[in-house]
Image (cartoon, rainbow, N blue to C red):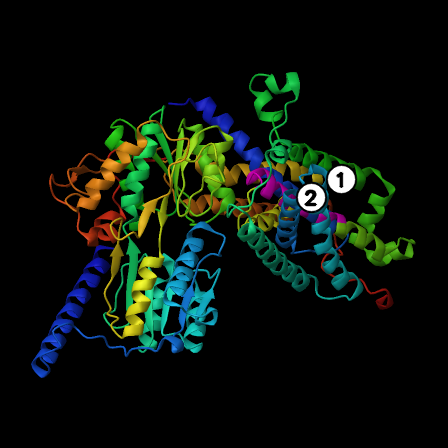
Amino acid sequence: MTGFWDQTSAFLYAAILASVPLLYGTLGEILTQKAGNINLGVEGMMYLGAVFGFLVGYGTDSLVLTLLSGFLAGAAGALIYAFLTVTLKANQNVSGLTLTIFGTGVANFLGEKAKMNAPLGTAFMSDRLRSFMSPMDLGAFSRLPVIGPLLFQHSIMTYLALMAGVAMHLYLKRSRPGLNLRAVGENPAAADAMGVPVAAYKYVHILIGGGLCGLGGVYISMVTCLGNWQPNIIAGQGWIAMALVIFASWKPLRAILGSLVFGALSVLRLYIPKSLIDIPAALFSMLPFVVTCLVLVVSSIRMRREHQQPAGCGVNYFREER
Amino acid sequence: MSNSVKKVRTTRLLVLFMLLTLSLGSFTLAASAEQPTSAFPPVALEDLKVGMVLIGSQDDGFSGAHYNGLEGMKAELGLKDEQVLYKFNVPENAECDAALRELVDAGCQIIFGNSWGFMNFMEEVAEEYPQVIFSHCSGYKNNGVNFNNYFGRIYQARFLAGIAAGMKTATGKIGYVAAWADNAEVNGGINAFALGVQSVNPDAVVYVKYISSWFDPTLEKQTAVALLSLDCDVIAQHVDTSMPQVAAQEAGKFGCGYNTDMTPAAPDAHLTAPIWHWSSVYTAEVKDVINGTWLPVNYFLGLKEGMVDISPLSKNVAEGTAEKIEEARARILSGEWDVFTGPIYNNAGEMVVKEGEALADADITGGLMTTLLIKGVEVK
């Protein structure tokens, strides 16, 4: 019988693995909402990133091109959304939902074609590319007791996600463009009067946000599924990322913590022995959303401005309306 | 549950009784009608349209096998492409109802559905369209008119795969990523697999985790990883993607897939997989439709009819596996012995099948099997 500590560290490791795609999606959506746009297309952009990252990796065998194409595919999905909502002022919710349906369909279609045409009836990456995506060896760090395996034996994409979170925090809090971006999200008219190019800010950040979501998709197809294409590969993780944005109260550093919590909740039921706690699995699957509701309730009661959604979110900005 | 089973049984009895009186009645009228005659007229080959509602796509293991089966039927009977209509990726909700009606409107004479959760939708639509035949895979219902079900004795193949797993395990612990709890199809598979394991490795245990989904790549992988952390060194599965095998491969362990040969996805891990050859049942049913001999009986074919089998043993199997499997296969093919022949104990230690007795089909597709887990199976 494996011991309690072995199971605990296995659980924590699994939680970290599960948290990474959520973190990418959440960071992408935070950046998007900071620009004053709610993009419900996270799931769709993750699908686009997953399939294009996979197809390019399958075709070119290059790590850089895999990541780049996943990012660009997510950004391309976001471009459709940005054009609809920023330029054409279409309804944000409808545009985002449509993007999810579109991305899911495109990914399943292209993935199925690739798989059906593959020589063995299943399309997967070369061993070389898989090894780039598998846990890195960070020398002495990786061999530290307990924390070595837990913290320093991860895929390069895990560290990229962490860096993206920290960088986004610094950008939003410490840089001039970050301040401008927050102004665009809170009050686009004021930002406009200040001389901030509102539409350009929205476009750039919605696109980068979409790219980050795309990387989340790449993580699922390349790391979780080890470069093995599967239909319906994202299976709702984009929606959990949406909930996580609220949980993180639009803060990148909290998103890192929140994704760990959500990742842990999503694998929790697999590590709690049935003999110890025997409740239906559905209750466990519900946990992330219950926690999100609680956070919403608590933050609404406390009414702290800095924990709220950017005020301009969901409303398209018409300059002539002022 | 027992109530509904009873209800099904009484309706079955009623249906049988009605069929009997019907055939007796026709016997008095015409001496030639000794067999119950089909209520459906023959269909000319060029007028035939076959529809199918699938829960997945061509590239997932389970639905892919069905697709290949129907394509095999199409080739064998010489149908044209436009005579076989598919509805892929249909969820087990009202969309199933809509898909069935679209196929009826398209003029299909027979419509197949390949997922457990389609059962009640098909039953309802079948009642509305008595001139169309509805054939459901993996359930247990039959309305005695135009709605039957078909399935295969996949448990026989699972038993054989269990032998490969039992021969391979070094830790004596085998993980099983299962779809739904309290489901006869799933539990029947687990039990048959465990019996196969125990036939060569009596002390080995099977750890089961249910994921409450037929299909979820990420969750299947996570579940397999959790089972591996419990010291399991062979991962079997009753879910549709190859992710549990991929997890085994990543951990340097072994596994038994399902639906299709999963060796390409996990070349260093995969041992063998229980697989389906659906074309045999599709060809049989559609032939009956063409000849006007289709009857509302259930099709439950096995190893002997070529409906189920295991994929070729990979290079990863333990020495002597092939011989053990051939031995068991011969026993099953002989017809004298089947997997669920007693004595069988449940995991509370009570005897559920007496020595020398074999479980009836009704208790394999439903009934007892719905909740049974045999000795040596633990839900984790």
Q: Residue at x 57, y 55 (%)?
A: A113
Q: Quadrant of residue A320?
A: bottom right
The disc, 2 or 1, on the residue closer to the chain's N-terminal end is: 2
Is A92 in front, or is B212? B212
Label 1 sits on what residue type? Answer: Met
* Horizontal arrangement in the rendering, residue B181 relative to residue A43 (left or right): left
Q: Is residue A282 visible?
A: yes
Label 2 element class: helix
Is A169 in front, or is B126? B126
- Label 1 resides on the chain identified as A
Disc number placed over residue A168 in the picture, else none: 1
Q: Eyeballing the image, is A209 above or below B133?
A: above
Q: Let me know if residue A223 is in the magenta part.
A: yes
Q: Quadrant of the N terminus of chain A?
A: top left
Location of mark 2 (residue): A27
Q: Which residue lies most toward the left here?
A: B28
Q: Quadrant of the C terminus of chain A?
A: bottom right
Q: Eyeballing the image, is B99 above or below A182?
A: below
Q: Residue at x 37, y 69 (%)?
A: B111
Q: Position of residue B204 (x, y in %)?
A: 29, 28
Q: Position of residue A149 (x, y in %)?
A: 57, 23
Is the residue under label 1 in contact with that under label 2 (CB below 8 Å)? Answer: yes
Q: Let me know if residue B300 is in the magenta part.
A: no
Label 2 sits on what residue type? Answer: Leu
Q: Are marks 2 and 1 on the same chain?
A: yes
Label 1 packing within 10 angstroms: few (<14), some (14-19), many (20+): many
Q: Give the magenta-colored segment's residue range.
A: A208-227
* Horizontal arrangement in the rendering, residue A145 relative to residue B170 (left or right): right
Q: Position of residue A160 (x, y in %)?
A: 70, 35
Label 1 element class: helix
Q: Eyeballing the image, is B360 above or below B294?
A: above
